Amino acid sequence: MKTSLVLSLFLFGMGGHVTVAMAQSPGAFTATGNMITGRFHHTATLLPNGKVLMAGGLYSTPPTQPSPFFGSLASAELYDPATGTFSPARDMKGEFADTATLLADGKVLITRGNPQGAGPYLSSAELYDPSVGTFTSVGYLNVNHTGPSATLLMNGKVLIAGGDIGDGDGASIRVELYDPATGTFTATGHLTAGREQNATRLLPDGTVLFAGGHGGVPVPGGGYDNLAGAEIYNPLRGAFSAVGAMLTGRDILGATLLNNGQVLITGGNEYYPFGAGGRDPQHPVVSVAELYTPAMLVPAPALFSLGGDGRGQGAIWHATTGEIASLSRAAVAGEILSMYTTSLADGSFNAPRVAIGGRLAQVLYFGAAPGYPGYYQMNFVVADGVAPGPTISVRLTYLARSSNAVTIAVK
């Protein structure tokens, strides 16, 4: 069956709409291999090859020592889910890691602040290349950021924003962009308010939401409330603009992009514990939750099925023949499959992930589906090690949101 006819049948049978059914299953925790080095406040980045890079962080000496202390780590290690073991990676060029961002080419951008001021009083950056397993310095940022946010934009650049000016010197309004094509950092528009320990979330329309954080807002009677204000970064204009404030100011908060396109705001501290004034510095925690509704609501991606209900046998075909990957023509490891989906972004460097039977597939291409405005085609490779069977799950994840699950046959 030709791919264009496949999609036409699915859209006709579904009235142009997709019913998403999320599979539910009980969860369990099981032990896996131990890390080589005990560390906390480190970064953990899922690489395209399925391994996880752990970088930097802090360590502490045993409390039995006369003068216990915390120290920064330059070491890194890799977790391999295929073997359940950790192996050492090369050391980073510097200690600690404030941010770690997976780039479109599979490398990882790491930034770190320099609060001590040794050398240039600027944040430094380096790249980890998983193909050769090395870290390479990419120089310095334009200013110092301690604990900023780092967001991979749809255009492939990384937005480094806010954080602490130094280390306890106050929240920064400074923002810059890292361009992987040139390996350079350039300034972009300032935040409307200095923010650190705020929430940052890339939205499906390509803009970035910044909410809350602390920047020092004095209140009558002494003390400081955390920020309630929020703002949006528009990469097309390179500028920030304020949007409606949260009902409750907070920092160290959660911001989760929901399947319907809204953002769930949860938790945090209502006031800065070290500037509580007459209030209890031990109990500023917020339990109230809020919803932010963007100007454009974009639902999570959806996968099509033969039944038209988003469940069961998927509308996923062999790229070479156009035949459905069903029991009569099962897929095999190393083969290229194709499918259509929704809610991706044209020209996005934020690649979607496809899991077949729980194993990541290599995505070869994603882009607009020819002749079907608003729909997108994906070509991907069936990974080695996928268990054979007539109903192997296929699921798409994009911008941390999961699609419905459909099935294919694998032999």
Image (spheres, rainbow, N blue to C red):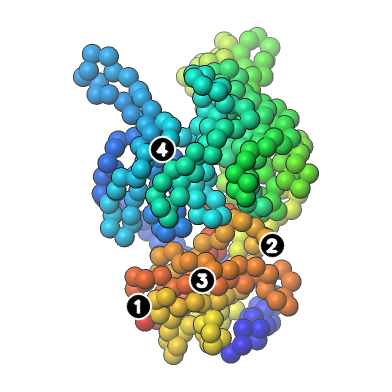
Q: Earlier in the sequence, mark 2 or mark 3?
A: 2
Numbered disc 2: secondary structure: loop
Q: Earlier in the sequence, mark 1 or mark 2?
A: 2
What residue is shown with label 1? 388
Which residue shows up at 34% across the image and 34% down it? 39
What residue is shown with label 2? 346
The amino acid at mark 1 is Pro
Distance from disc 3 to disc 4, alpha carbons, whole Å, reads: 32 Å
Q: Nearer the viewer, mark 4 or mark 2?
A: 4
Instruction: Look at the picture and state if 267 lies above or below 135.
Output: above
Distance from disc 1 to disc 2, alpha carbons, whole Å, reads: 34 Å
Residue 92 disc label = 4
Q: Nearer the viewer, mark 1 or mark 4?
A: 4
Q: How many marks?
A: 4
Location of residue 348 by image quarter: bottom right
Taking depth in this image into account, of 39 and 103 the one nearest to the observer is: 103
Q: Residues within 10 Å of mark 2 (few under 14, many from 20)?
A: few
The amino acid at mark 4 is Met
The amino acid at mark 3 is Phe
Is residue 191 among the parts visible in the rendering?
yes
Location of residue 364 by image quarter: bottom right
